[in-house]
Amino acid sequence: MVVDGIRGGEGDDPGLDGDGGNDTIEGQTGSDVLIDGQGADLLLGGDGDSDQHTLSPDGARDEANCGNGANDSAVAIEGVDCANRNCEVRYTPVLAPAPALGSRVLSAPMFSKVLVANRGEIAIRVMRTLEELGVGSVGVYSEPDREAPHARRASEAYLLGPGPAAESYLNVEKLLEVAEQSGAEAVHPGYGFLAENAPFARAVEEAGLTWIGPPADAIDAMGSKTRARELMQAAGVPIVPGTTDPVEDVEAARKIIGESVGYPVAIKAAGGGGGKGFRVAETEKDLEKAFEGAAREGEKFFSDATVYVERYLPDPRHVEVQVLADSHGNVIHLFERDCSVQRRHQKVIEESPAPAVDPELREKIGKIGVDAAKAVNYRSAGTMEGLLQDGEYFFLEMNTRVQVEHCVTEMVTGIDIVREQIKVAAGEELAYGQDDVEIRGHAIECRINAEDASKNFAPAPGRIGNYREPSGPFVRVDSGAEAGYEVLPLYDPMIAKLIVWDSDREFSTRRMLRALDEYAIDGLKTLIPFHKALLASEQWRNGETCRDLMEDKGWLKEIEYPAPAPADDDDEEKVERDYAVEVSGRKFEVKVIGAAGGANGAGPAGPAKKPPKRAQRDKNAGGGPNEVTAPLQGNMWKVHVKEGDEVDEGQLLCVIEAMKMENEITAHKAGTVAELPIEEGKPISSGDPIAVIK
Ligand code: MV4
């Protein structure tokens, strides 16, 4: 095999340091191995807490990082000083391919290592493509993420700091330090965290690293929604009718709406996006409240109280276009996705192609996406979000990152979007021209969030028990979780994505339902039952937006959660056991519920489970049947009731803001608010009392 373009000999990278995946070799933790006559502790950092740092002594891998590639005959490492985590590693290249790639390495990798500044499923998603490219991955983790799958999946991983994102995944200084220490040449931010933070993109480049994302100026331009609207309008891209300049005050808004926009109207925060700082005024009567609400939320979340107004479209579809651009002036689109199924502006199901888009409209909105990208000198992967109403398409905002739902586009086009991002960042031309891109079949993605749809989509963190992912033809699971994994209230509750492909929407829906049935996540509540119910609905089948279902409290409440409750029940001791019985040679699975310990533990070795808590008791009701407790840590953003109020079951009690998300807390039963030990603006911890309802 000929491998060309391998550099080396002067202490630069061998070019072939792709990680084989899991470096852990059992039983090797902490062993000392001599490298070039130096007694280097092969446990990176010497912390002994995490297997991912353990050296693979088999010589099969030849990562550049210290603590790896200990085959003395193949790698010469000088000046190794791992103990202070300031590794200065020089080595000579080895002409052997990364093991996972076998003999399929066709050209030298563009980077030796890339730092993946993220966690969970997207970090793993990026690392997978890096490995395929023969590029090493540098993972990062917070203290509670020490054992998390993404940290183990990386070729090498580094601690950032304590759990709160501000001290870990958002810590720019620390991330740059890790980049330097590890010898990473580029940074991939994933989505969320620092992905659309222009100062971070600039800091990465100023540190001499490559930013795997769009130019910082494009992030800035699109970050201001008013500026984005102005730029798009100038580029001939249709925008939702309204203002492109900030609207000073309620009076100015009243005037503009009266003269041109009309009611109902959407008031949006200029620094917003994704529905943050978005209020609707049905009539002039609601205007002041909507204006002030949007401004306040903009100030709070984006330190920018500027708002603008748009005509409010009553039942639009959310249709977005994926674009790819390189630094040679090539811009293409990868068709559209429909993400109309949303809850509190969070997408929950996405699909491609969009059911309401015909080939003619597809071509038109694809061109809109390309024009929009060209207008901001875009590079990398990006998404033009828009609203589709009655066949009319309007630009809404541009997301300057890889999106959660990029996978459905990958499934219908066969293009690895992350691979294109990485290659484009390295200066390569896009591997595809517009005419090479075809859309084939239909893909659907369901977000697997640790949330309880029947409780107003309240986050439901906890520890996963048994875990089994679906599989089979055209099923893809991008997951950051596993058996025993604890979903922390600190981070986004999306733990995995299930993506399927089939020849058309109906088959794709059936395949998704089959895969959802196969997906077993015990120990906590997820959106799986919600997805099953929604995808089986007539509304979904008819290709509707499903807005009516998403707002139907009764329908949502019916989504019964079949998973067993965690084993902290104070009810009388009863256990559930699953048995297999055979009747006339046919196997039946039966569940036997009986008193605990009745069989003196001598029953068949089937898994014993506690029964579900009586009457679906609220997970929030940690302090007793009348008490509502905080399911997550955050800030008390709004209190909607007062002591003595009569509330209905499901009625909104308060809103907790956490990680820029609003989490509505509702009454678990009807009654009187007897106690309400909460206050707006105060921090609240997971498990803190919110209300007692009697
Ligand atoms: C809108 C809208 C109606 N009119 N803007 C903004 C962020 C995105 N997550 C949803 N957003 C909307 N912006 C105007 N001028 C309605 C929505 C909207 C929506 C749109 C399509 C499909 C589902 C939706 C759910 C909530 C809000």
Image (spheres, helix red, strand yellow):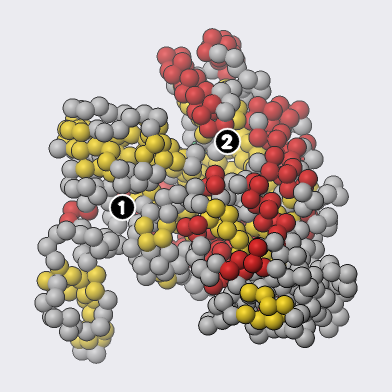
Tell which residue pokes out farthest to the bottom in this image. Answer: 585
The residue under label 2 is which amino acid type?
Answer: Gly
Compared with residue 178, is residue 457 higher up or lower down, i.e. above or below?
above
Q: Quadrant of the C terminus?
A: top left
Depth check, front residue: 497 or 5 = 5
Residue drawn at the location 72% of the way across and 83% of the way down: 71
Measured Cα–Cα span from mark 2 to mark 1: 30 Å
| Quadrant assignment for the N terminus | bottom right
At a point 70% along the width and 35% down the height, the residue shown is: 220
State yes or no: discs 2 and 1 in contact (Cβ < 8 Å).
no
Q: Which residue is mark 2?
A: 273
Q: Which mark is residue 387?
A: none
Foreground: disc 2 or disc 1: 2
Relative to 246, say whether 187 is above or below. below
Callout 1: 10 Å neighbours few (<14), some, many (20+)? many
Q: Position of residue 456 (x, y in %)?
A: 34, 43
Residue 91 left/right relative to 114: right
Quadrant for residue 285, please give it. Answer: top left
Locate residue 311: give its quadrant: top right
Which of the marked residues, 2 or 1, is nearer the chain's N terminus? 2
User: Does residue 557 appear anywhere in the picture?
Assistant: no
Q: Is mark 2 within 8 Å of ligand 1?
A: yes
Camera-side residue of 665 and 561 = 665
Circle on res. 559:
1
